[in-house]
Image (spheres, grey):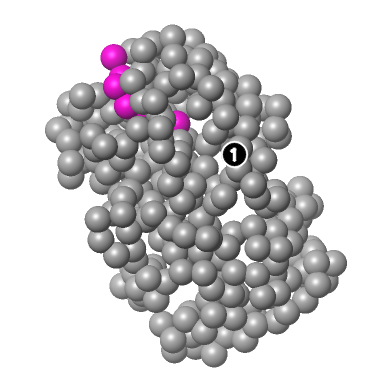
Amino acid sequence: MKVLVTGANGNLGSQIVESLLTKLAVGEIIIGVRDLKSEKALKFKEQGLEVRVTDFEKQETLLNAFIDVDRLFIISTFGDFETLMHQHTNAVEAAKATGVKSIVYPSVTRAEGNDFYLAGMHRAREVAIIESGIPYVILRNNWYIENELGTIHGCMAGAPWVTSAGEGKIGWVYRPDLAEAAANVLVGEIYENKIYELSGENLTQQQFVDTLNEVTGKEVSLLAVDDASYEEMLKGVGVPEAYLPMLVATQKGIREGGLESKHSDLNYLLNRQATSLKQALTNLLVDAN
């Protein structure tokens, strides 16, 4: 069996590869990257892994890369809707043309009926995969705990935890858990035409901060503001103008329940208990130092 992971230079993709290396022989894993000369690509080669170019803007690279691939992990790309759908369609069509036997795709929580700003983009990409006729597994990942590290570091330096998300809840999840779950699906024999919701415990911003304080021994305070004030505070600390709409939309979406999980299949795919927020923060902030 041959498994190819696109986006393997990224945080999630590289962790999926790490997990696959505990489950498959080196010769069964193929690395997909845009740049063969990147540091991570060179490290993969040093491990004896085959590395192929997978540039989603250049379908010919995908047609070459997907040859003899049985199971394909297609990472979600970034950009405006037209750009990302063009890139995603290139990948799906290349998979179909080269006879890929199954696709695994990381989506977002409750993509089919969610007003969260990311959901529509992922919903369209899910449909493209499903309509291709290729057997699939959709992994609807909730918000990475690691997404909060920038804010956490600011809080460790004395800043409050600023949010306009109100009492909205997030099923924060530890990225290594998501990588392990994806690897299990890529090597498993029982997953086909399935959609899984992968989330942690639903918590408010205050509950996240309380856990952060418990782990670090700090007394980070939470500052609740409205969206306009949140945007002004972001500007005040130098966040580029282009990122402001996305960051404000994230807070609004959380406030409206866009990242609250109704259920989670993560324990099932891991065949163990998912890592708790407290343990993940300990791993990221205490054990890492």
Q: 137 or 230, which lies in front?
A: 137
Residue 211, image x, y percentages = 47, 81
Check the image and report above or below for 282 versus 57. Answer: below
Q: Residue at x 64, y 58 (%)?
A: 258
Q: Does 151 sit left or right of 215 as displayed? A: right
Residue 162, image x, y percentages = 68, 75
Q: Secondary structure at mark 1?
A: helix
Residue 46 visible at all = no
Residue 241 visible at all = yes
Check the image and report above or below for 154 versus 12. Answer: below
**Crowd around label 1: few <14 · some 14–19 · many ≥20 (10 Å):** many
The image quadrant that residue 58 belongs to is top right
Task: State the count of labels.
Answer: 1
Q: Does 275 sit left or right of 83 as displayed? A: left
Where does label 1 land, which residue? Answer: 122
Residue 105, image x, y percentages = 45, 36
Q: Residue at x 42, y 71 (%)?
A: 277
Quadrant showing the N terminus: top left
Residue 237, image x, y percentages = 73, 67
Q: 243 or 172, which lies in front?
A: 172
Outermost residue to the left = 25
Callout 1, which amino acid?
A: His
Quadrant showing the C terminus: bottom left
Q: Residue at x 33, y 63 (%)?
A: 274
Q: 275 or 269, which lies in front?
A: 269
Q: Residue at x 42, y 21 (%)?
A: 134
Q: Which residues are magenta?
A: 68-74
